[in-house]
Image (cartoon, rainbow, N blue to C red):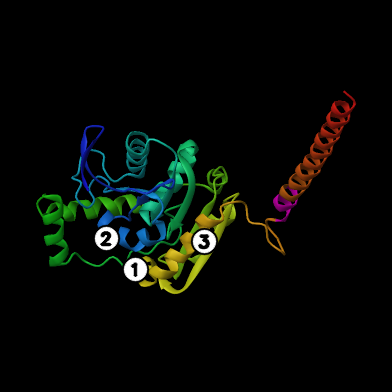
Amino acid sequence: MSYINLRGHSTWSTEHHGKGEPVLLLHGGLSSTESWDYLVLPALKRRHVFAYDRTAHGRTKIRDGYYHFDFQVEEAIAYLEDVVKQPAHLIGWSDGAIIALLVAIKRPDLVKSLVSIGGNYHYDCGLSLEFILDTSEEEYEKFEARSGQPRALLDQIKKKAFDVWASEPTMTTKQLATITCPVLVLAGDDEPFPLAHTVSLFESLPDGRLAVIPGSSHSFVKEKPELLQTMIKDFYHQQEFPITRSPNRRKEKQEKILEAQSAERMSGDKRMKRRNWIDSLIRRTLGRS
């Protein structure tokens, strides 16, 4: 854990070394890496995990232009290019999920897979922000201690956040349909927006999976962490396009995949027969010499 210079801005960054493929954690809005990474890391023990506090979050100070999603997406791309230095699996919660989706749309070459936790793709989705309470004394103290900025600045950051959430993001289902990597959409059954919005997100993705967690809210990461970890482990264990017994919306693509696999097997059988014929011919030829 340390500060890095991310294209001219001092940014709090953490890294957990593993031999597996890289994973980038993207925390929620008005939050930080250390507020949730400990709940996800048990599912990523073999992975090389990266995380950072975005501008105006956690231990990273504000700078001009902060909080708009375009700004945060460019910051994420810069981190992937300069720190991770290769395509990664993204896991984002809330605002982090929005950023992950936007990165996958803008720079698909940087995203191997994506886990969206409690993410909305459009601000006009019936979003309620009543679950975000007034700032407590503890929050002011934590903000001042972590960021080294005056506590009054937290009110400015919160106002900026609410202004952004009132007009962003503005992704369309057509844009979501361009995300071709595997995506796991996770949501509580009592998110601050209608479940129909989550289903719309899932159904727009060419290679999506959906899990709605019963008896949970936007904070299900902290309410049911073991279930979250199980879902992530299962997703990483099987990232090929799902082949199921009774496909419906996946039926057409599943049939094409199975047909291609069948053709490949038949081609392989023909190659094997030809190889055996050549070997037999060689043995017969050598036997006569």
Q: What kind of element bears circle 3?
A: helix
Q: Which residue is mark 1?
A: 222
Q: Which mark is residue 234?
A: 3
SS class, disc 2 = helix
Identify the residue shown where x is 22% and y is 32%: 8
Local packing at callout 1 (Cα closer than 10 Å; few below 14, some 14-19, many 20+) is some
Q: Position of residue 227 (x, y in %)?
A: 44, 69
Please tell me whether the stretch drawn in magenta is mainly helix, strand or loop: helix
Judging depth in this view, the residue of 247 and 280 nearest the camera is 280
- Give neighbour class at mark 3: few <14, some 14-19, many 20+ (Cα, 10 Å): few
Q: Position of residue 178 (x, y in %)?
A: 56, 42
Above or below residue 75? Residue 45 is below
Which residue is identified by label 2?
Answer: 35
Q: Earlier in the sequence, mark 3 or mark 1?
A: 1
Q: Residue furthest top?
A: 289
Quadrant placement of the C terminus: top right
Type of the residue with mark 3: Asp
Question: Going from the N terminus, do you reach mark 3 or mark 2 first?
Answer: 2
Q: Nearer the viewer, mark 3 or mark 2?
A: 3
- Please give left or right for residue 229 compared with residue 207 in the image: left
**Residue at (15%, 60%) from the top-left corner?**
142
Height in image: 141 above or below 100? below
